[in-house]
Image: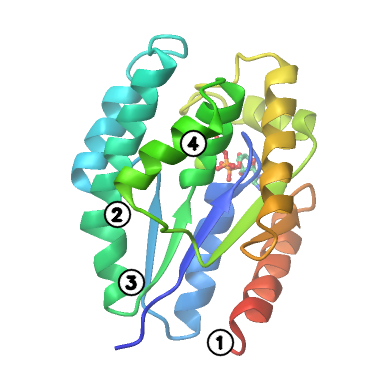
Amino acid sequence: MTQGKFITLEGGEGAGKSTQVKRLADFLRTKGREVVQTREVGGSPAAEEIRTFWLLKGEGHWDPLSELFLIMAARREHLVKTVFPALARGAWVVCDRFVDSTRVYQGIAQGLGSTLVESVYRGVAPGFEADLTLLLDLPVETGLERMRARRGQDDRYQQKPVAFHQKLRDAYLDLARNHAQRFRVIDAAADADSVALDITRVVGERFGDL
Ligand SMILES: Nc1ncnc2c1ncn2[C@@H]1O[C@H](COP(=O)(O)OP(=O)(O)OP(=O)(O)O)[C@@H](O)[C@H]1O
Ligand SMILES: [Mg+2]
């Protein structure tokens, strides 16, 4: 049986990940693929329960290390119950955030360090990485403006200073440079239609004729 493809979308607050995950999933379906559209933290029943519990309290409630383990527990559930079975039956999995978010938020911005994050992740899914990671990159202020316009949902990191978001952006761009085979950086400041078009072009280039 052909193995499916695992595509992750990453980027800071308001970059347009959720918007583009849906659009990419719809596009792949029009090409006749079975598509599983999913997200982290979440994506399986137990992982969604962890997400709800995690987001109950505002930013600063969790100790960063406790938060790392919560997120990794949810990731393990998501992989075992949703992602691995889908890939095994040949589906394309399009995921809104994955382990790069943990690398950047917990590892760099919250300061836990990449050695710790990588060693915990090795216990969760040794060597497992996306086939393609789309980094939706845009100026911090643009992302925050979009979030202010959409206030309310999951606004966990929005109260953080601009410097925190700048650190996230820089860390994402560093990751993309260091894993250039896996990453493609997308200009996410453009309008949603242009971004979607860019993404389908990149996906086509990466995987050949769909
Ligand atoms: N290219 C775009 N141009 C302008 N506005 C956009 C664009 N893409 C998404 N938006 C709007 O910006 C807001 C944030 O988009 P979206 O929720 O997709 O971002 P996100 O990266 O998933 O954010 P979060 O990190 O909070 O999950 C939404 O209100 C969405 O409608
Ligand atoms: Mg989102």
- Residue at screen point 69% across, 36% down: 171
Earlier residue among tags 1 and 3: 3
Labels 1 & 3 near each other (Cβ < 8 A): no
The residue labelled by disc 3 is 87
Q: Is 173 on the left-hand or right-hand side of 124?
A: right
Q: Is residue 93 above or below residue 71?
A: below
Residue 20: image location, x then y, percent: 58, 56
Q: Is residue 118 above or below residue 3?
A: above
The residue labelled by disc 4 is 102
Which quarter of the figure has residue 23? bottom right
Labels 4 & 2 near each other (Cβ < 8 A): no
Which quarter of the figure has residue 37? bottom left
Earlier residue among tags 4 and 3: 3
Residue type at mark 1: give it: Leu
Q: Residues within 10 Å of mark 1 (few under 14, many from 20)?
A: few
Earlier residue among tags 1 and 2: 2
Q: Nearer the viewer, mark 4 or mark 1?
A: 4
The residue labelled by disc 2 is 79
Q: Gap in Å between the C-alphas at discs 4 and 1?
A: 31 Å
Residue type at mark 3: give it: Leu
Cβ of disc 1 within 8 Å of ligand 1? no
Q: Nearer the viewer, mark 1 or mark 2?
A: 2
The residue labelled by disc 1 is 210
